[in-house]
Image (spheres, rainbow, N blue to C red):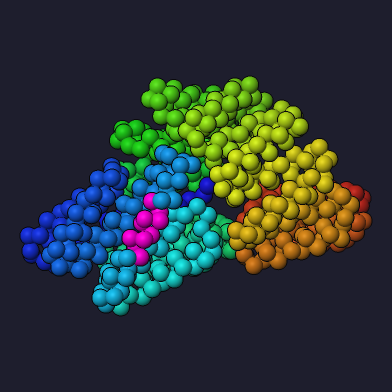
Amino acid sequence: QGFKLCGVGRVRLHLLSSLPMAAAARSLLDAAEAHLDGDEDNAEALQLAQRALAAFREASDARGAADAVRVLLAAHRCNIQESRNETPGTGGEQALLIDAENLAQRELDVFSGSGDKYGEASVLTAFAELCLQRRDPSQQILEDAVSRTGQARSLFKELAEKAMEGRACLADANCQLQRRHWKAATEAARAGLALFQAIGDKQLQAKGHQALAVTIVQAPATRSASEAVTEGLQHAKKALALFQELGLRKLEAAQQNFLASWYLTLGRPKDALPLAKQAMAAFRELRYGKGWQAESRSTVVKALAQQYQWKEARKVALEGIAEFRAAGDKKCLVLTIDSLVHLHLEAVVEQKGDLAEATQLAEEAIGICKQLGDKKWEANQVFNLAQIQIRQKRMDLAEETLMEATRLDDDAGEELEQAVKLQMLVEVNFRQSKFDKALKVASDMRSTYQKCGRRQEEAAACLLVSQCHAARQELQKAFDVAREAQALFQEEADKQGEAQVWDLIGHLQRMAGEAQEAEKALTIAKALQHQAGDKKAQAYALQKFAGLCAAQDRFDEGLKAS
C-alpha cells in the first residue's frame, strides 16, 4: 500500500496573551494535541479543540483560534481514518469528510475575510491535508490541495513563521507524492527539513528527516539507486536517533518498523529483523495501537521468511493469531492471518509451505471480513485464496476466485485495488492460453490506470497488452503498444520500467526473426538496468543475452554472459 508521510504533530505554540481565558484555552489545546500525538483519543481531542476554539474566540485571540482550528481539523482527519478502519462500507467516513471540509471552508472564509494571514495559512494547510483523506482523490482535488499548500507556504514565509512554513512544506510534499510528482515532493520535504533545522526544533527535525526519507522511498530511480538508498537510509536513521533522544517511544517504534520494511524491500532481512523485533516489543510494552502490533509482527514474519527461517516465522505468526483471536480483535487477526498466508505462498517455492493450512486460514479471514462488512479487506483475502489456487495449478478455479475479488473491489469503489487483481487475472488467462480474454482484461486494466492518472502503472499495463498481442501473433500491434509504454516510462523518468520495455522489444524482435535488432534491444535494457542499479534485472538480461548468443553459435560471448 505504500508509505505515507507522518503528520508533523505539535508545533511550538506561542503565548500571546496573559488573559486567563487565553491561558486556559492554551492548556486545552495542548491537551488536545497530546491526545493526538500520544494515546490517539480522537473524540477527546475533538472536544478539547472545540472548547479551546470557543475560548480563544471569546478572548479575541486570533492566533490562538487559528491554532485551535488547525488541531480541530487534525482531529477530524483522525476521526475519518478511524471511521474508515472501524466501520467500513457504512458511508460514515464520507459524511465526516464533508462536515470537516465544510468547517475548513467556513474557517478559511473567516480568516481570509478578516485579513488574518496566519489564520488563513494555517487553515489552508489543514484543508489540503484533509483532502488527502478522500479515497483515490482525483487529479483536480490534488491540484487544489497543492495550490493551498503553495499559498500557505508563501504566507508563512512572508510572516517569518518558520515552524509553520516547514509544516506547510511537509503537507505540500505529501500532496505532491499523491500526485506522483516526485521531484516536487522531494524538494518540498528538503525545504521543510531545512526550516526545522534553522529553528533547532529536534522533534520537527525528526519528522522532517522522516518525510524526506519517505519521498526518496516513493520516487522511482531517477539517479543511481545506490545513491538514493544511501541518502534515504541516512535520513531515516537520523529520524530514529532523534526520536530515541527525545524519548518519543511510539514514534521511535514506528520509525523502527519503517526502517525494517525498507530494508526488506532492499533484500536486507538481516538488517530488518532486529529493528522489527524492537518495534514489536515496544508496541506490546506500550500496549499501543494493536494495529501497530499486528503490523510490526508481520514485518518480523517477513524478515524471518526472507532468511528462509520458515518454522520461526510461522511460530511468530501463530502466536499473534492466538493473541488477537483471544482478544477478539478481528482486524488485527486478519492482518496476522494475511502474513501467515503469504509466508506459505513464499515457502511453497522451497517446498516448505503448507497450502492446505494457507487455504484454511484464507477462508477464515474471508469469513471475518464478511462479519466486519469490509469488502475491500474481503477482496484482498479472496485474492490470497486465488494465489493459493494458482500455486495448486487450479487455474479454472483461480480465475473464478479472481473475478469474485474484482467484483468485491468494484462494490467497494476500489478501482486501483481492482487493477492489481486484474493483472493476476491476465496471467491466469495466459497460462490457460486464453489470449483473447487476457487482452480484454489487460486493456481494462490500462483504462483504469489511465482514468486515475497513474502513468507508471498505465505503462506497466501497456507491457501486458503488448504481450497479449504478441501471443495472438499480432506483432505490429505489440510493437506499437510497447512504444507507448516506453514513452510513458520516459515521461516518468523510470529507468527500470524503460528497461522492461527494451527487454520486451528484444523478445518481439526475436519472434520476428530479427536477431541483431533483438541483441541491440537487450544491450539497451542492460545499460538502463545498470543505471537503475537493479542487479537482479541485470542478471536476467545477461541470461537472455547468453541464450541469444547460443542460438547464433556465439558460444564464447554466451559463456561470458552466463
Can residue 486 be seen by looking at this rendering?
yes
Point 27% across, 50% down: residue? 46
Q: Nearer the viewer, residue 526 or 287?
A: 287
Q: Position of residue 136 (x, y in %)?
A: 53, 54
Left or right? Give the position of 225 relative to 519. Answer: left
Point 29% across, 75% down: residue? 113
Residues shaded magenta: 96-105
| Residue 229 is one of the magenta-drawn residues | no
| Figure check: 393 above or below 94 | above
Q: Nearer the viewer, residue 22 or 196?
A: 22
Question: For residue 205, what is the image quadrant?
Answer: bottom left
Can residue 260 be seen by looking at this rendering?
no
Question: For residue 491, what is the image quadrant?
Answer: bottom right
| Figure check: 292 above or below 131 | above
Left or right? Give the position of 402 relative to 186. Answer: right
Left or right? Give the position of 526 relative to 83. Answer: right
Q: Position of residue 13 (x, y in %)?
A: 21, 62
Question: For residue 85, what is the image quadrant?
Answer: top left
Left or right? Give the position of 444 relative to 22. Answer: right
Point 54% across, 64% down: residue? 139
Q: Position of residue 391 (x, y in %)?
A: 70, 30
Q: Position of residue 509 (x, y in %)?
A: 86, 57
* Tally of numbered discs: 0
Q: Nearer the viewer, residue 310 or 123?
A: 123
Point 21% across, 50% down: residue? 48
Main secondary structure type of the part rendered in magenta: helix
